[in-house]
Amino acid sequence: MKCELCIKSGYSFLSSVLKIDTLIEYALNNDYKTLGLVDKNVMFGAKEFYEKCKAKDIKAIIGVEFDVEDFIICLLAKNEEGYKNLVKLTSYKNAKKDVYLTISDLRDYKEGVIAIVPSSPL
C-alpha cells in the first residue's frame, strides 16, 4: 500500500505551489488509497483537502509541520481530538510569530497526535 504523509500544498508559503486538486489527481493516477497533507504552521487547506479526498474515496490524513527546537516535526491527527489539538497548536504558534515551538509546548497538545521527525536537525 502506497501512502504519502508529509506533502505540502500551496498553503505552505514559500514551500510548495501544489494545488490540492493536483495532489488528489496524483493520488488517483497512482492508486493511492491514503494521502496526507502537512502544511507548514497552518491548516488552511485541511477542510478542502479532507472533503476532496472523501469525494474520491481516499483516506485523508491531516497534519502540520512545525520547527520545534532544533528539529522539523510533522504532527498528524490520529482522530478528532488530535485534529483539535493541531488546530490549537497552529493558533498558539501563529500567535507567537517568530518563536520556535518547544517540546514543552507540544506536551499540552499530545493527545490524538502522532509525531514524525522527517529530517535532520536544522
Image: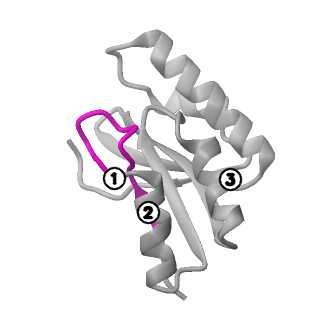
Question: What distance separates the C-alpha of mark 2 from that of mark 1?
Answer: 7 Å
Residue range (magenta): 5-18
Q: Which residue: 34% across, 44% down?
A: 72
Residue 23 badge: 2
Q: Which residue is mark 3?
A: 51
Question: What distance separates the C-alpha of mark 3 from that of mark 2?
Answer: 13 Å
Depth order, front residue of 107/114 = 114
The answer to whether mark 2 and mark 1 are in CB contact below 8 A is: yes
As drawn, 15 above or below 91 = below
For badge 2, the amino acid type reads Leu
Q: Which residue: 53% across, 33% down?
A: 44
Residue 18 badge: 1
Residue 78 badge: none
For badge 3, the amino acid type reads Glu
As drawn, 39 above or below 94 = below
- Label 3: element kind: helix
Q: Which residue: 41% across, 46% down?
A: 73
As drawn, 11 above or below 98 = below
For badge 1, the amino acid type reads Leu
As drawn, 62 above or below 39 = below
